[in-house]
């Protein structure tokens, strides 16, 4: 239909739905208002599932079998995400980068939100965890470049990245060493995963994609 037509349809339907809110039963009005403020296609599915389940449970006539199934799926996903968050958090705490680089961002939940959103399902668990690690390193390296390092230290870091071996870390300031080793290990772990699952050695491609 084209973006312009869809935008007009959104504006038209949104305007008329908002104008009818005062005539709707309170629970339905709240459901419609939340849907307008947080549309499904731009919201976290777990958030919308909770929102939708809450509304279904308020209806006078309910399909209890479907509702129980949906609630069970919601709880399974919730527990899975909590386990993954715990694993990522343990990894992050063990790295100790938050203590070594106080100026760097410490936002594990935020880093996890993106892979949680784009990769749904139990089978993608380890990929969500690994992508969260990658995102964390992007943020940390960005903070090092923007907030912490001197120009000379950045040159040393760039040289170490080009050399791409653990011995290169010896030339770095102490606060950079853990970051460099974490980046090195994550990159190689992902290459190993690619080799085991697909028979593809992706290390050269990953090295070119380093932050």
Image (cartoon, rainbow, N blue to C red):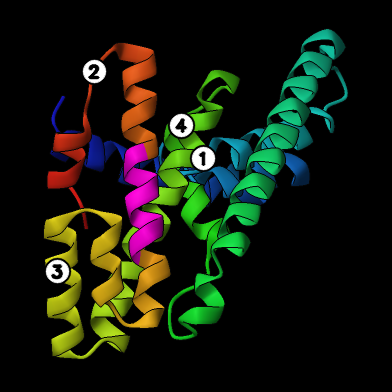
SS label for mark 2: loop
The label shown at residue 129 is: 1
Identity of the residue drawn at 12% across and 68% down: 159
The label shown at residue 127 is: 4
SS label for mark 3: helix
What residue sits right under mark 2 in the picture? 200
**Label 4, residues with CA under 10 Å away: few <14, some 14-19, many ≥20:** some
Asked if residue 118 is among those painted magenta in the image, a careful observer would answer no
- Look at the image and tell me in which quarter the C terminus lies: bottom left
Q: Which residues are magenta?
A: 180-188
Residue 39 horizontal/vertical position (percent): 47, 42
**Label 3, residues with CA under 10 Å away: few <14, some 14-19, many ≥20:** few
Residue 160 lies left or right of residue 81; in this view the side is left
Report, in whole angstroms, how far the alpha carbon at label 3 lies from the one at label 1. 26 Å
The image quadrant of residue 27 is: top right
Report, in whole angstroms, how far the alpha carbon at label 3 lies from the one at label 4. 28 Å
In this rendering, does residue 127 appear at all? yes
What residue sits right under mark 3 in the picture? 158
- Of badges 1 and 2, nearer the viewer stands 2
The image quadrant of residue 48 is: top right
Compared to residue 37, the image places residue 7 above or below, namely above
Report, in whole angstroms, how far the alpha carbon at label 2 lies from the one at label 4. 17 Å
Which residue appears farthest toward the top when viewing the image?
Answer: 65
Identity of the residue drawn at 38% across and 17% down: 196
Residue 177 horizontal/vertical position (percent): 37, 71
Q: Are marks 3 and 1 in contact (CB under 8 Å)?
A: no
- Of badges 2 and 4, nearer the viewer stands 2
- Front-most of residues 172 and 150: 172
Q: Earlier in the sequence, mark 2 or mark 4?
A: 4
**Label 1, residues with CA under 10 Å away: few <14, some 14-19, many ≥20:** many
**Label 2, residues with CA under 10 Å away: few <14, some 14-19, many ≥20:** few
């Amino acid at each position: 239909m084209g973006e312009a037509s869809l935008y007009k349809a959104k504006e038209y339907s949104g305007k008329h739905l908002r104008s009818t809110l005062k005539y709707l039963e309170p629970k339905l009005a709240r459901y419609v208002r939340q849907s307008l403020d947080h549309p499904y296609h731009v919201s976290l599915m777990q958030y919308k599932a909770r929102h939708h389940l809450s509304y279904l449970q308020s209806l006078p006539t309910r399909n209890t079998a479907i509702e129980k199934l949906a609630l069970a799926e919601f709880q399974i996903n919730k527990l899975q995400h909590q386990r993954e968050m715990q694993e990522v958090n343990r990894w992050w705490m063990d790295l100790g980068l938050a203590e070594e680089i106080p100026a760097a961002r410490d936002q594990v939940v935020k880093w996890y939100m993106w892979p949680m959103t784009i990769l749904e399902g139990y089978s993608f668990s380890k990929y969500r965890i690994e992508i969260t690690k990658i995102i964390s390193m992007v943020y940390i390296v960005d903070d090092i470049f923007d907030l912490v390092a001197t120009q000379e230290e950045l040159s040393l870091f760039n040289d170490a990245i080009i050399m791409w071996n653990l011995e290169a870390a010896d030339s770095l300031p102490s606060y950079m060493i853990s970051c460099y080793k974490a980046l090195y290990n994550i990159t190689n772990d992902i290459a190993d995963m690619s080799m085991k699952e697909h028979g593809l050695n992706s290390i050269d491609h990953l090295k070119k994609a380093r932050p």
